[in-house]
Image (cartoon, rainbow, N blue to C red):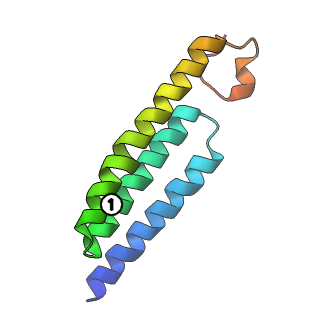
Amino acid sequence: MSLFWAVDYACLAVILTAAVTVVRTENLNGAVMALSAAGTVLSLLFVVLGAPDDAHAEVVVGTIALPTLYLLAIGKVRAAVGEPEDADDLGEEGAP
């Protein structure tokens, strides 16, 4: 029984770390990847807790669909706006 508690606490620690990374990361693509990681670990936690239906929904929505939509939106906005003159302020690498 104590092994399940250890897995629960480990999953919660990783989810909390990923959530803080999402908020504190200046690179938008990195924040989206951290959000996807949080969704992946959350689906694992659902499996451990015995909720496979919720785990499937979290994999589809939180790990695949939502980050994909965010990345598409970020790409479209960057394509429409173009490269900003002072991209250093955005925290993006590869800025001129």
Image quadrant in which you'd find residue 2: bottom left
Picture coordinates of residue 8 (x, y %)? 36, 75
In this view of the protein, which residue sits in the foreground, 87 or 36? 36
Residue beneath label 1, please? 43
Quadrant in which the C terminus is drawn: top right
Compared with 16, 73 (above or below) is: above
What type is the residue that disc 1 sits on? Ser
Residue at 25%, 64% in the rendered image: 53
Compared with 56, 87 (above or below) is: above
Residue at 34%, 82% in the rendered image: 5
Picture coordinates of residue 80 (x, y %)? 61, 12
Left or right of residue 54, residue 92 in this image: right
Q: Find numbered disc 1 in the image and state the secondary structure of the residue it sits on.
A: helix
Image quadrant in which you'd find residue 57: bottom left
- Label 1 environment density (alpha carbons within 10 Å; few <14, some 14–19, many ≥20): many
Compared with 6, 76 (above or below) is: above
In this view of the protein, which residue sits in the foreground, 46 or 61? 61
Compared with 7, 30 (above or below) is: above
Picture coordinates of residue 19 (x, y %)? 54, 56
Picture coordinates of residue 47 (x, y %)? 26, 68
Residue at 60%, 21% in the rendered image: 77
Q: Residue furthest bottom?
A: 1
Quadrant in which the N terminus is drawn: bottom left
Q: How many marks overall?
A: 1
Residue at 54%, 41% in the rendered image: 31
